[in-house]
């Protein structure tokens, strides 16, 4: 896997095997679109060996983060706010100080074209949240690793908590001037397009819908559906297959075509799903 020297990286997080599958598809999609940046996956200790092995083939760096084990301020913060477990793990991305700039991407995102130009943006750049556009969506954001910022974020978290119980609440609380201070930190919506938005404003999607990143936010994640690779059809929790975006099909095409063979190699004869 050729990556030219760079101190910039895409970073994702998976605390379990389900999200790890998302991270595999994300990693594969970034490679397919020839990113010149490094790829880093933060994984929780629960992620199985076979999944970690596949991630290691797709990512330059797979780092196991166990906030509970860390014995530092992150651990202390976690003891005070055990409800924010995954959030603290996500904030760990600020400790990747061997990179000067990073783009965090949720494991339920997938890129549709090369997005290396995001590294021209500054901390904290992100796209508006489709449900409340004065907040940014924390599924895709540009940041600068810094031990100092990490410490301040943890402190903010323990003192103020998260207004939505997750990382998006914490980050919007901490970077609270995002909405008003600097328009260059507002990423175009096409860098974090949620399928929800497509259905609420279909004409806009057709008008400006040159999507670069799709984000499967919400309850049902792509891996929660089942897919018939021969018929190229999705089935699953919702009955009406026509309500599924073509992006879901794109996710499954990448997953079944490129990721499943790698998983099969790792699992051998043992079944996985
Ligand atoms: N995540 C994880 N394990 C979890 C929940 C979340 O690793 O049990 C990570 C993963 O990278 C995920 C991100 O945190 O994409 C944010 O959560 P999610 O995407 O489920 O939230 P949504 O985008 O639907 O609000
Ligand atoms: Mn997400």
Image (cartoon, rainbow, N blue to C red):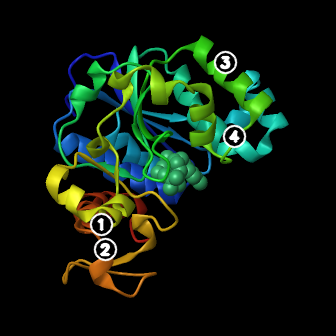
Q: Do the residues under discs 4 and 2 have CB atoms within 8 angstroms? A: no
Q: Residues within 10 Å of mark 3 (few under 14, many from 20)?
A: few
Residue 20 makes an appearance in the image: yes
Instruction: Give the CA separation, mark 4 to mark 2.
Output: 31 Å
Provide the residue designation for mark 2. Answer: 244
- In the image, the residue with mark 1 has its CB under 8 Å from the nearest atom of ligand 2: no
Q: Earlier in the sequence, mark 4 or mark 1?
A: 4
Q: At 23% from the left edge and 77% from the top edge, which residue is drawn?
A: 229
Q: Do the residues under discs 1 and 3 have CB atoms within 8 angstroms? A: no
Instruction: Give the CA separation, mark 3 to mark 4.
Output: 14 Å
Provide the residue designation for mark 4. Answer: 162
Q: Where is residue 189 in the image (x, y as percent from the top left)?
A: 31, 43
* In this rendering, the label closer to the viewer, 4 or 1: 4
Residue 49 makes an appearance in the image: no
Q: Nearer the viewer, residue 29 or 210?
A: 210
Q: Do the residues under discs 1 and 2 have CB atoms within 8 angstroms? A: yes
Q: Do the residues under discs 3 and 2 have CB atoms within 8 angstroms? A: no
Q: Is mark 1 on a helix, strand or loop?
A: helix
| Above or below, comparing residue 236 to residue 246 in the picture | below
Q: Is mark 4 on a helix, strand or loop?
A: loop
Q: Is mark 2 on a helix, strand or loop?
A: loop
| Above or below, comparing residue 86 to residue 217 in the picture | above
Q: Which of marks 4 and 2 is nearer the N terminus?
A: 4
Q: Which of 77 and 55 is in front in this view?
A: 77
Provide the residue designation for mark 3. Answer: 152
């Amino acid at each position: 896997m050729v990556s030219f020297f760079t101190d910039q990286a895409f970073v994702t997080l998976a605390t379990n095997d389900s999200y790890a599958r998302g991270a595999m598809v994300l990693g594969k999609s970034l490679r397919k679109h020839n990113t010149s940046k490094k790829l880093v996956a933060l994984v929780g200790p629960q992620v199985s060996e076979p999944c970690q092995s596949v991630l290691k083939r797709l990512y330059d760096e797979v780092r196991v983060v166990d906030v509970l084990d860390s014995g530092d301020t992150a651990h202390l913060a976690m003891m005070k706010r055990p409800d924010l477990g995954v959030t603290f793990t996500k904030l760990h991305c600020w400790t990747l100080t061997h990179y000067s700039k990073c783009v965090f991407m949720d494991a339920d995102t997938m890129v549709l074209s090369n997005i290396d130009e995001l590294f021209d943006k500054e901390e904290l750049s992100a796209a508006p949240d489709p449900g409340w556009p004065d907040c940014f969506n924390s599924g895709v954001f540009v940041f600068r690793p810094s031990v100092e910022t990490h410490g301040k974020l943890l402190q903010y978290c323990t003192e103020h908590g998260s207004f939505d119980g997750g990382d998006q609440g914490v980050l919007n609380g901490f970077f609270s001037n995002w909405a008003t201070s600097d328009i260059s930190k507002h990423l175009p919506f096409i860098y974090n397009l949620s399928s929800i938005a497509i259905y609420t404003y279909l004409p806009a999607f057709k008008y400006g819908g040159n999507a670069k990143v799709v984000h499967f936010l919400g309850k049902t994640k792509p891996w929660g559906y089942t897919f018939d690779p021969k018929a190229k059809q999705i089935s699953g929790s919702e009955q009406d297959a026509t309500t599924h975006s073509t992006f879901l099909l794109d996710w499954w095409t990448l997953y079944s075509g490129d990721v499943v063979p790698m998983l099969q190699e790792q699992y051998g004869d043992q079944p996985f799903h």
